Amino acid sequence: MLEITPWKVAQVVLMSRELNRAEGELRGFIERLNEDEQASLVAIMWIGRDAFAADELAEAINTAKTEATTPTADYLLGTPHLSDHLENGMEELGISLSDEEDDLVRRG
């Protein structure tokens, strides 16, 4: 089970698309997530890049928690195509971010 809301994942997706403008904001956002949320975010990214299957979510989260050697923000910000991997991972899990992304964009 995911330990992060789709709204928070959508926040990361949108900020990572504007990384050259929003890197500091994205880094701060990720650092303020609790350990469970950070591990879920990493697991979603891994699922989105096919390192784990959607039915291996619990294993991916556990791996993210036990094998973390780099701060999560550093790891994720150093991942090429982060927004694509997160969106793909959520889709693999059967969760669409469209409504959350649209809501965030409308709010500005």
Image: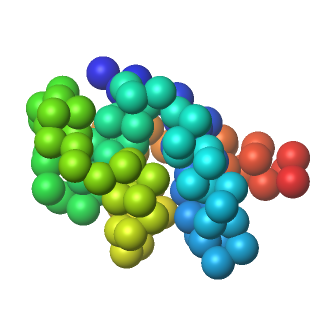
Q: Height in image: 105 above or below 23?
A: above
- Kindly identify the residue that appears in the image at 14 percent across and 48 percent down: 52
Q: Quadrant of residue 85?
A: bottom left
Q: Picture coordinates of residue 62 (x, y %)?
A: 17, 30
Q: Is 44 left or right of 11, judged from the image as shown?
A: left
> In this view of the protein, which residue sits in the foreground, 23 or 47?
23
Q: Picture coordinates of residue 2 (x, y %)?
A: 36, 26
Quadrant containing the N terminus in the rendered view: top left
Q: Height in image: 103 above or below 56?
A: below
- Kindly identify the residue that appears in the image at 76 percent across and 44 percent down: 103
> In this view of the protein, which residue sits in the foreground, 82 or 26?
26
Q: Is 60 left or right of 104, judged from the image as shown?
A: left
Residue 14 visible to the viewer: no
Q: Picture coordinates of residue 98 (x, y %)?
A: 60, 49
> In this view of the protein, which residue sits in the foreground, 35 or 90?
35
Q: Quadrant of residue 65?
A: top left
Quadrant containing the C terminus in the rendered view: bottom right
- Kindly identify the residue that appears in the image at 57 percent across and 54 percent down: 27
Residue 1 visible to the viewer: yes
